[in-house]
Amino acid sequence: MLIYAVRVEIEVEVAEAWRYWMLHTHIPEVLQTGFFRGHRFGEMIDPPPPSGRRVFLVMYEAGTEADLKAYLEREAPRLRSAYPPEFKERFQAQRWIWQMS
């Protein structure tokens, strides 16, 4: 199993609106692509995030390497470009792929 993990550090002023958008729009759209079995979503609480920022982690479970590759090639660019304008320039994202046993 592969985990596609996305860590997002976002400004406090827009964090709640972003969180709502992620849970009610973006994550459902990612899952609707059919390339992931499920997801986990959480917020970092320790150590405390940098002042003025909140830090979130989304982990998507891909069944196969082919599924993840297809998502990254076919769907990720479209979904990343669909970020609402109020969040652009106000967050930083880091992405990792983990092989799980």
Image: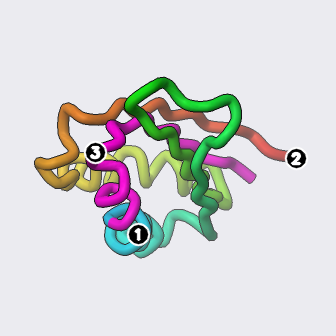
Residue depicted at 61% across the width and 37% down the height: 97
Q: Which residues are magenta?
A: 1-20
Inter-mark Cα distance, 3 to 2: 38 Å
**Mark positioned earlier in the residue sequence (3 or 2):** 3
Q: How is the image coloured?
A: rainbow
Inter-mark Cα distance, 3 to 1: 30 Å
Nearest to the observer: residue 17 or residue 41: 17
Report helix, strand or loop for mark 1. Answer: loop
**Mark positioned earlier in the residue sequence (2 or 1):** 1
Pair 3/2: label in front: 3
Residue depicted at 36% across the width and 57% down the height: 16
Give the residue at the far top of this rendering: 50
Residue 39 in the figure: left or right of residue 30: right
Residue 84 in the figure: left or right of residue 9: left
The residue tagged 3 is 13
Residue depicted at 51% across the width and 64% down the height: 35
Q: Position of residue 21 (x, y in %)?
A: 32, 65
Pair 3/1: label in front: 3
Give the residue at the far left of this rendering: 85
Query: Residue 11 in magenta?
Result: yes
The residue tagged 1 is 33
Residue 18 location, quadrant: bottom left
Q: Position of residue 83 (x, y in %)?
A: 22, 52
Give the residue at the far right of this rendering: 101
Image: 35 above or below 48? below
The residue tagged 2 is 101
